[in-house]
Image (spheres, grey):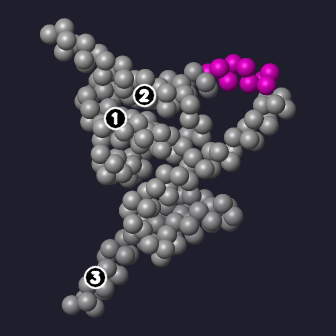
Amino acid sequence: MYLRAAKTYTMYLTLFLTFLKIGLFTIGGGYAMIPLIERDVVRRGWLPREEFLDLFAVTQSIPGIFAVNISIFVGYRLRRLPGSLICALGTILPSFCIILTIAVFFDRFQENPYVIRAFAGIRPAVVALILVPCISAARSLHLTLPQLIFPLGGALLIWLGGVSPVFIILAGILGGIIYTRWISRYIKKQKS
């Protein structure tokens, strides 16, 4: 009985420390955390890579903080409700403490040239950390160049055109409905 309790405690501690480490050392938000979460979760054998990619797709479609959603799903998959709570706490705790600290001392360091330069230097790394899971997902899903035109076009409209992401999402929903309702049926009729 004690051995079983010790194994359970060790698993909870491992889950907490894994997600605490990811939350503590990842700058740039949820998408920047994806490669780290994937590496740890898949390498430890907690989830196979294919299931992680499915999880990645599901967590993008539900509201909430992306990295927290993934940690909750992983924790629930491994240890049900207690596991999901521990993984979520591990993910949230570092950000909460850092933001609390920044809020307390922000007025003192807001105009500090070293702080300004540090944040300017971090930006390219954050872009790379966000781009890596996108490329990884595209490769895993075996997307072709024509299938990438719309996401790339949407990204360019947001970045260069100043279009609100809400309109891009709504256009994507509308395009998906049109495709599944009419275009895919037309293609099937042409093939038969």
Q: Which residue is mark 1?
A: 44
Whether label 1 touches label 2, CB < 8 Å: yes
- The image quadrant that residue 43 belongs to is top left
Q: Residue lying at the far top in this picture: please name it.
A: 2
In the image, residue 119 above or below residue 60: above
Above or below for 147 versus 119: below
**Residue extent of the magenta highlight:** 100-109
- The x, y position of residue 165, in whole percent, is 56, 58
Nearest the eye: 116 or 9? 9
Decide if residue 125 is on the left or right side of residue 105: left
Local packing at callout 3 (Cα closer than 10 Å; few below 14, some 14-19, many 20+) is few
Please tell me whether mark 1 or mark 2 is closer to you in this view.
Answer: 1
* First in sequence: mark 3 vs mark 2: 2
Q: Amino acid at mark 1?
A: Arg
Callout 3, which amino acid?
Answer: Arg
Residue at label 2? Answer: 18
Residue 57 coordinates in the image, percent (x, y): 38, 53
Residue 104's spot in the image, x, y percent? 69, 19
Residue bearing mark 3: 185
Helix, strand or loop at mark 2 = helix
Residue 58 in sight: no
Q: Is residue 147 visible?
A: yes
State the quadrant of the N terminus: top left
In the image, is 41 to the left or to the right of 162? Answer: left
Q: Which residue is rendered at x = 44% and y = 29% of the image?
A: 19
Q: Looking at numbered disc 2 in the image, what kind of residue is underneath it?
A: Thr
Q: Residue at x 31, y 79 (%)?
A: 184
Do tag 3 and tag 2 residues touch (Cβ < 8 Å)? no
Q: Is residue 82 above or below residue 26?
A: above
